[in-house]
Image (cartoon, rainbow, N blue to C red):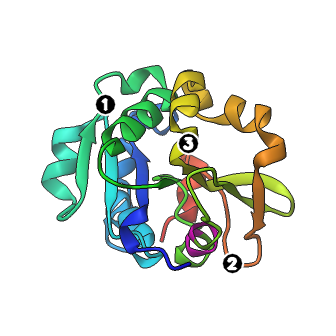
Amino acid sequence: MTHTQDEVAGLLLAAGGGRRLGGRPKALLTHRGRPLVEHAVGVLRAAGCARVHVVLGAAADAVRERARLEGCVVVENAAWAEGMGTSLQAGLASLAGTGARAALVSLVDQPGIGPEAAARIRAAFEDEESLVAASYDGVRGHPVLFGAAHWAGVAASASGDQGARAYLKSHAAALTLVECGDVARPQDIDTPEDLAHLE
């Protein structure tokens, strides 16, 4: 069974305000000479996602101005300060009616996770019941693929900075883990010390 490129949409959560970075929005941190959000969109595209939705929050206007997001659907999350859960809800809601059968969710602040890992997760998509996550030495991480059958449940359980953690925990039996530790580094850029992971 072959899948069209539109079946798995990329969903990039890029709304964070970088509180522990002195309020520098993560989307605008520089990586390889361009805003980090641009790099992260490129990863999803390289992994085979023809449709990419980007959830912005902190400094959304500045991000739109400085980052090249042509061809992306930009979703603004007014409630971004409440945590990643609201961005996940806004992003999934924006995919309703697009024909996407799954969402490949990635975080803007993990530049060490490249197209190889994202493509592995995308390749594990089978149908709308698919639930797949990258793992690093056996520990669950991002990206995560949610088949459309899971979207309502994920949105209902997302809260604060937890995102989909509770949902994934309660659906552990249905979750497929795909080891990516050989091709990616899952460090988050959260503190000034973490900026060393940027190039």
Mark 3 belongs to which amino acid?
Ala
| Residue beneath the point at 71% across and 29% down | 166
Looking at the picture, how far across and down is residue 135, in whole percent? 76, 60
Q: Residue at left 76%, top 70%?
A: 181
Main secondary structure found in the magenta portion: helix
* Amino acid type of the residue tagged 1 in the rendering: Asn
Magenta residues span: 118-122
Image quarter (top left, top right, bottom left or bottom right) of the N terminus: bottom right
Q: Are marks 1 and 2 in contact (CB under 8 Å)?
A: no
Q: Position of residue 108 (x, y in %)?
A: 45, 53
Which element is circle 1 on?
A: loop
Residue type at mark 2 is Val
Is 36 left, or right, of 103 in this rendering? Answer: left
Which residue is denoted by mark 3 in the rendering? 149
Depth-wise, is mark 1 or mark 3 nearer the camera?
3
Mark positioned earlier in the residue sequence (3 or 2)? 3
Look at the image and tell me whether residue 22 can be seen. Answer: no
Residue identified by numbered label 2: 183
Secondary structure, mark 2, is loop
Q: Residue at x 66, y 59 (%)?
A: 186
- What's the distance in space between the residues labelled 1 and 2, CA to CA? 31 Å
Q: Residue 77: which numbered mark, if any?
A: 1
Q: Is residue 8 at all visible to an observer of this figure?
A: yes
User: Residue shown at 54%/72% (left/top)?
Assistant: 114
Front position in the image: 92 or 32:
92
